[in-house]
Image (cartoon, helix red, strand yellow):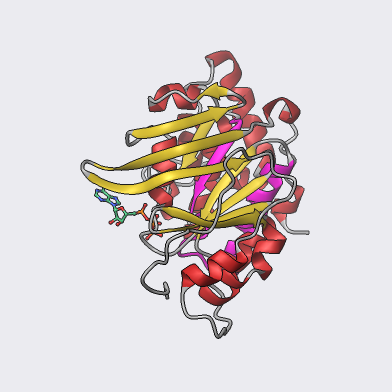
Amino acid sequence: MMWWREMAFEHGAAARRAHLKVRGLSAGYGAFPVLRDLAFEARPGLTVILGPNGAGKTTLLRALNGLIPRKGEVLLDGDDLPEKTHEIVRGGVVLVPEGRQLFPQLTVLENLELGGWLVPKSERSARIEQVLADFPKLRERSGQLAGTMSGGEQQMVAVARAMVSSPRLLMLDEPSLGLAPRMVDELLAIARRIADSGTTVLMVEQNVKKALAVADRGYVLERGTLVASGPAKLLARSTVIRETYLGAQSSETTTAARAARDAVRDPNAARPEPVEAPRQARPERIS
Ligand SMILES: Nc1ncnc2c1ncn2[C@@H]1O[C@H](COP(=O)(O)OP(=O)(O)OP(=O)(O)O)[C@@H](O)[C@H]1O
């Protein structure tokens, strides 16, 4: 049995099953707009945002985390998500950024302690103890300097650090980036276990096939716009995913034509403004 299969994550999980609803979200950098009028949800479980380089996936998570200004409605369990990062974190929304951003000269344990900065002191050591129980490999390595760990181990520390605050919504920005295939599988399995244990997970990934294999739902973001969405299993079989991201062939010529024909919808979704394929043709296929 692999160590991550033993993770429990059983700590008041039911209370954290959060539901994020986003409508009309726009964000960018100064005068440079990146995201335009996005509508999507992250329901309890694991939602993945897919898309090519530069589509705006990281920008989306940064906007939700208050790192850049945003316009539009962002509701977490029906309440407006605050705009300032520390208030967002206090509200139970935590981002594990691309590149992990650990403190390499601090030990694993010290890095985990930093994840508890908003946890009341009285609860902090219990939270860290729980996380070490959930990530037994990190308990073995708790005294090791984070900077001396492998990329995959560092990514685990980053995820574990986020879990110290017991988030309701965990946002992961490309957790598999730069990892060997076996580590990719482990990290994605960890994301799945966290979602199964009650923390809603919103994950950005470029590893389309593997991400859809562990996710419940997925969205495809291209050039700042959502072009398809649906249950992960259906999305994995959709033309837009198979041809644009998994290399299958088609006689259709544009991504827009495929997306319009093949946008995947969840018939059970309660979306007042469903995500749809774009109505206007876009100039070229994204390779
Ligand atoms: N700090 C910034 N200032 C200005 N423009 C930025 C900044 N960060 C990103 N961008 C631009 O925003 C667009 C979206 O970038 P973003 O990093 O969100 O894409 P992504 O989908 O996450 O891509 P990747 O998979 O390569 O990380 C790109 O055109 C990028 O050049």
Residue placed furthest toward the left: 31
Question: In the figure, 69 relative to 105: above or below?
Answer: above
The residue under the point 54% across, 66% down is 259
Locate residue 42: give its quadrant: top right
273 or 145: which is nearer to us?
Answer: 273
The residue under the point 65% across, 52% down is 217
The answer to whether 164 appears left or right of 235 in the picture is: left
Residue 174 colored magenta? yes
The answer to whether 85 appears left or right of 1 in the picture is: left
Q: How many marks?
A: 0
Q: Position of residue 246 (x, y in %)?
A: 56, 75
Q: Position of residue 202 (x, y in %)?
A: 57, 45
Question: In the figure, 196 relative to 224: above or below?
Answer: above
Locate residue 92: give its quadrant: top right
User: Split into 4 quadrants, where in the image is the C terminus?
Assistant: bottom left
Q: Which residues are magenta?
A: 167-196
Q: Position of residue 164 (x, y in %)?
A: 57, 31
36 or 49: which is nearer to us?
Answer: 36
Residue 157 colored magenta? no
The answer to whether 32 appears left or right of 11 in the picture is: left
The residue under the point 37% across, 33% down is 71
276 or 70: which is nearer to us?
Answer: 276
Q: Is residue 247 visible?
A: yes
The answer to whether 185 appears left or right of 25 in the picture is: right
- For ligand 1, give the image quadrant: bottom left
Q: Position of residue 260 (x, y in %)?
A: 55, 65
Q: Is residue 150 visible?
A: no
The residue under the point 78% across, 59% down is 1
